[in-house]
Every structure is written in C-alpha cells, then in structure tokens.
Image (spheres, helix red, strand yellow):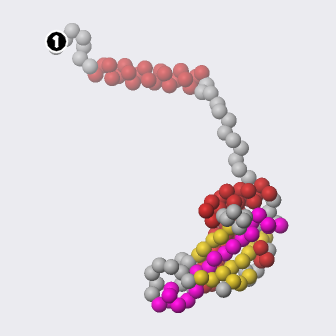
Amino acid sequence: MIVSARGDLAISSRVTIPADELEESFIRASGPGGQNVNKVATAVQLRFLAMASTVLSDEVKARLMKLAGQRGTLGGEIVLEASRHRSQERNREDARERLAELVRTALQPPPPPRRKTRPTKGSVERRLKAKKGRSDIKRMRNRPAGKGD
C-alpha cells in the first residue's frame, strides 16, 4: 500500500521538503507483537528522492547521501523504516522526524580541517622539567649507592 506523504516536511525555517518528493508505504512489522503485528500493516517505509530534490543544493545532497549510509540507494533515494510503535500514525511521525534530523545534519557545513600546530618552546621546557622532577623523586626512593650491599 503506497501513499503520498500527507504534507510538506519542514526541516528548518528556510528548508521545507515538498510532499511530492516523499513516498510512504505501509508494511507489516517484523518481530514480536502477536496478532497485531501479523494482521496490521503498521510499519512505515519512507522514501525520499534525495538526488532529485529541488530544495537541496548539490553539496547538501552529497553530504546527505554520505550520512544516510546503507539507507541510501544507488538511485539516489533514502529509505527509512519505522516500526517502533504499534500505531501507523506514530510510526509515520517517527520516520518523518528521523528524516528531518538527517537532513538537518546534512545542512550543517563541515568544520574546517584541523591545522597542525607545534608546541611552544615554553611548554616543551615545562614538560621536560616535570619529567626530570618525577625522575628525581623516583631515584630518591632507591637505596643509596654502596649501602646495604
């Protein structure tokens, strides 16, 4: 049973995914649950046509597909399955919120690469002085040379 998503999915104040880029289908959930799980299709499979999206830039699409991992398909879709809850409505909300969180993460620009720095001369000297102090303390714990032989 395939149903178009109810409405647009608001990601942020600037980004909203239109409903025609989302596709929901309802499937039977696996796992324990007895009669309800065996008879009712409560699990939701949400498909987002990420690479064909008109609201996301190419950089965001690339980050989104990388973040999606195994949930991304070769065709540029992201497939999320939600079956945590007993009701179809709560599973639908869960899948839509998980997709929104994934897109929000992809919208964040990556941090700049770390620049290598060298320790200052003073910090190197302090470290070596501390090491020498520990060495002296440990050496003082030994028996004096020539005594107790």
Q: Where is residue 60 in the image (x, y as percent from the top left)?
A: 76, 58
The answer to whether residue 91 of the structure is visible from this angle is yes
Helix, strand or loop at label 1? It is loop
Quick check: 57 left or right of 122? Answer: right
> 79 and 87: which one is in front?
79
Q: Quadrant of the C terminus?
A: top left
Give the amino acid at mark 1.
Answer: Asp
Q: Which residue is drawn at 62% across and 27% down?
A: 118
Q: Where is residue 143 in the image (x, y as percent from the top left)?
A: 23, 17
Q: Which residue is drawn at 24% across and 11% down?
A: 145
Asked if 28 appears above or below 105 in the picture, the reply is below
The image quadrant of residue 71 is: bottom right
Quick check: 72 left or right of 131? Answer: right
Q: Position of residue 3 (x, y in %)?
A: 71, 84
User: Which segment did they paint magenta?
Assistant: 35-54
Residue bearing the label numbered 1: 149
Residue at the front extreme of this rendering: 74
Residue at the left extreme of this rendering: 149
Q: Where is residue 59 in the image (x, y as percent from the top left)?
A: 77, 55
Q: Is residue 53 rendered magenta in the image?
A: yes
